[in-house]
Amino acid sequence: MKNYFKKSLYLLVMAASFAAHAGSFEDFFRAVRGDNASGVRTLLNRGFDPNTLDEHGQTGLMIALREPSPKVIQVLLESPQLNVDLANAKDETPLMLAAIKGQQDLVTQLLKRDAAVNKTGWTPLHYAATSGQLTIMKVLLDNYAFIDAQSPNGTTPLMMAAMYGSGEAVKLLLAEGADTTMKNQLGMTAVDFANKANRAEAAELITAAMNAKTSPKAPPKDGK
């Protein structure tokens, strides 16, 4: 009989714990979407894991970035338990989203939390180049972002800048030494990306950079 009561008590405690966690789960993501900073802080202080994924594989920080919920973002970034590199189901990290959205202050904060600048697959530099975020591109490169990083299909940041970014983004990558000869899995170069998007300026910039590298240097006029 004693064992029966012990087992029953254990099951009741487990059920209560599960119910509390389930309630916290719903409360947390509701607070995140509503930019309820105090609600999120309260749950974190109670021990709720800020790295919990919702039913769609999204973390609270990723949701806050998309909403946006700026107050909640700050609360989450203050949490020592937060994993700033935790990616969503599409393998996107918070730094990648901040980069493509041009959120320079958030990029700075994430880097202070040692967010990964380099990763396999798509990278923050790909995302920044896609939307022509020059300042963020410079910050990433200053933090040793691999300029010729390849996505799963072999696409480089220069290719993304050529097709979607800006002429200035292309110029920056070329000035920093981006490889103009690389090809993706379809055999396309950065020039091909620019031509496909009818980006004449980008195509000219990349072609000029390629010619400058292959053209022999003229000898000095004095013959020395």
Image (spheres, rainbow, N blue to C red):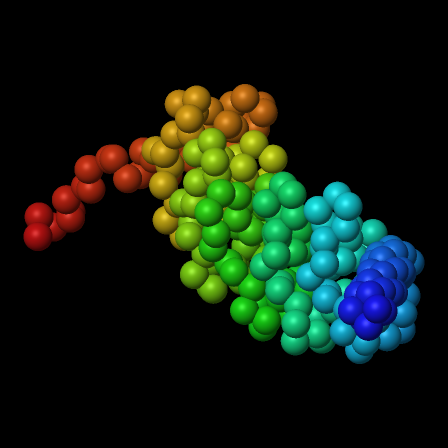
Q: Position of residue 58 (x, y in %)?
A: 72, 50
Picture quadrant of residue 94: bottom right
> 54 or 139: nearer the eye?
54
> 109 or 138: nearer the eye?
109
Q: Position of residue 82 (x, y in %)?
A: 66, 68
Please give the name of the residue rendered at 78% of the width and 69% of the height, measured from the top-left corner: 3
Q: Position of residue 165 (x, y in %)?
A: 60, 40
Which residue reaches farthest front? 1
The relative height of residue 192 versus residue 23 in the rendered view (above or below) is above
**Is residue 15 rendered to the left or right of residue 47?**
right
> 107 or 15: nearer the eye?
15
**Is residue 121 rendered to the left or right of residue 70?**
left
The relative height of residue 167 versus residue 194 in the rendered view (above or below) is below
**Is residue 187 rendered to the left or right of residue 135?**
left
- Number of numbered discs visible in the structure rendering: 0
The relative height of residue 113 versus residue 18 in the rendered view (above or below) is below
Please give the name of the residue rendered at 57% of the width and 67% of the height, measured from the top-left corner: 111
Please give the name of the residue rendered at 76% of the width and 74% of the height, measured from the top-left corner: 47
**Is residue 138 rendered to the left or right of residue 174?**
right
- Please indicate, yes or no, whether residue 220 appears anywhere in the rendered image: yes
Which residue reaches farthest left? 224
